[in-house]
Image: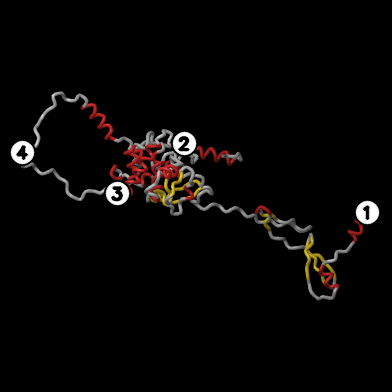
């Protein structure tokens, strides 16, 4: 063994208590060393086995027991077990929320990554929004939340259970009949501001949000407010005209007659005209009548309202959803966009 190593092994262990005792201070102290507790007194230094140390928490939260002292039997350590979930508790990625949709309260369990459109359409069965791109690009799923137009496909339902007021196209009409349509719904219907109807509800809700703060918008302001909505049929001129017509009606509500209407009074004098008949009746009366009748039908009222008679998608529970597939990839460590 080299000389310097031999000197280190032969060097006596001087504890802090030895130093204090040597200095003439009459106090007792202990120093923790590997293998036990060294007790220093005026009579000498002796080492006694240390008590079994308690378990301590190491890095990352794991329970770690320090190594026992030499010559001391290791005592079994109690390992903390994770608390069992309470009965009826939801998984970590699920939330129970109460959504205020069109004034009705809906208590529903949602995934933290679940969109409002998914909740309303697939879980609640509400036929109130359409889905176009599912990327917040087309505006077909637009709803109004606390007065603001929001894409239903990109807002999370888990964040809407704090009293926010969610308004859909079914909530702005006062009754299921055509008389109960909101002015913006009636304007889209009368002006023909739609074609296929996929984007119509989103356009109406964006227009509704605009008219709540500005009932006399310019054409440029209308175009700006509807810039987040896309009509692939290209009905923009009719859409802008519908918004302008609705704004006019909101500024000047129609006056309902108060007098009781009835048949006109009977004439008492001689008739002022003579009865006559055309020699050649017009042959196009029937054709004009058919066209006029078709125009008066004004098809498409379901597209501008929340009428439940419109077609809606039925989701089969035995099919894997896109969200479930994305979750499987994410749980496996793959990057999911």
Q: Residue at x 66, y 52 (%)?
A: 60
Using the image as rendered, state which of residue 20 and residue 142 is in the foreground: 142
Residue shown at 36% from the left, 40% from the top: 241
Q: Which mark is residue 2?
A: 1
Please give the name of the residue rendered at 37% of the width and 43% of the height, measured from the top-left corner.
Answer: 243
Does label 2 or label 1 sit earlier along the sequence?
1
Disc 1 secondary structure class: loop
Who comes first in sequence, dot 4 or dot 1?
A: 1
Mark 4 Cα shell of 10 Å, populated few (<14), some (14-19), many (≥20): few
Reading the chain from its start, which is encountered first: label 1 or label 3? 1
- Secondary structure beneath label 3: loop
* Mark 4 lies on residue: 270
Report the Cα–Cα distance between label 3 and label 4. 42 Å
Marks 2 and 1 sit apart, C-alpha to C-alpha, by: 78 Å
Q: Answer few, some or many: residues within 10 Å of disc 1's Cα (few below 14, many 20 plus, some between 14 and 19).
A: few
Specify whether residue 75 is in view.
yes
The residue indicated by pointer 3 is: 253
Compute the Cα span from label 3 to label 2.
Answer: 51 Å
Mark toward the start of the polypeptide (4 vs 2): 4
Mark nearer the viewer, 3 or 2? 3
Mark 3 or 4, nearer chain start: 3
Q: Position of residue 313 (x, y in %)?
A: 41, 36
Which label's residue is closer to the chain start, 3 or 2? 3
Density class for disc 3 (Cα within 10 Å; few <14, some 14-19, many ≥20) is: few
Q: Position of residue 128 (x, y in %)?
A: 39, 42
């Amino acid at each position: 063994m080299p000389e310097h190593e031999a000197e280190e092994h032969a060097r006596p262990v001087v504890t802090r208590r030895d130093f204090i005792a040597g200095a003439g201070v009459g106090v007792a102290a202990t120093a923790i060393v590997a293998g036990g507790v060294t007790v220093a007194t005026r009579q000498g230094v002796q080492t006694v086995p240390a008590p079994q140390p308690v378990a301590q928490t190491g890095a990352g939260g794991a329970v770690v027991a320090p190594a026992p002292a030499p010559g001391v039997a290791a005592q079994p350590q109690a390992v903390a077990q994770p608390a069992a979930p309470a009965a009826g508790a939801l998984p970590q990625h699920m939330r129970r929320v109460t959504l205020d949709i069109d004034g009705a309260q809906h208590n529903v369990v949602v995934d933290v990554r679940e969109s409002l459109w998914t909740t309303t359409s697939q879980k609640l069965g509400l036929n109130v929004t359409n889905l176009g791109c599912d990327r917040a690009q087309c505006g077909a799923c637009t709803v109004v939340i606390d007065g603001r137009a929001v894409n239903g496909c990109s807002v999370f339902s888990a964040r809407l259970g704090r009293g926010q007021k969610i308004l859909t196209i079914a909530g702005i009409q006062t009754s299921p009949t055509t008389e109960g349509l909101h002015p913006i719904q009636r304007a889209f219907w009368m002006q023909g501001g739609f074609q296929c109807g996929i984007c119509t509800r989103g356009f109406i809700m964006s227009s509704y949000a605009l008219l709540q703060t500005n009932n006399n918008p310019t054409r440029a302001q209308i175009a700006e407010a509807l810039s987040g909505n896309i009509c692939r049929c290209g009905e923009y001129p009719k859409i802008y005209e519908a918004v302008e017509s609705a704004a006019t009606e909101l500024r000047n509500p129609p006056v309902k007659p108060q007098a009781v209407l009835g048949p006109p009074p009977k004439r008492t004098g001689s008739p002022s005209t003579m009865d006559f008949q055309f020699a050649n009746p017009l042959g196009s009366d029937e054709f004009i009548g058919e066209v006029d009748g078709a125009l008066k039908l004004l098809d498409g009222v379901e597209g501008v309202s929340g009428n439940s008679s419109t077609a809606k998608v039925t989701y089969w529970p035995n099919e894997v959803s896109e969200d479930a597939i994305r979750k499987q990839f994410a749980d496996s460590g793959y990057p999911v966009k």
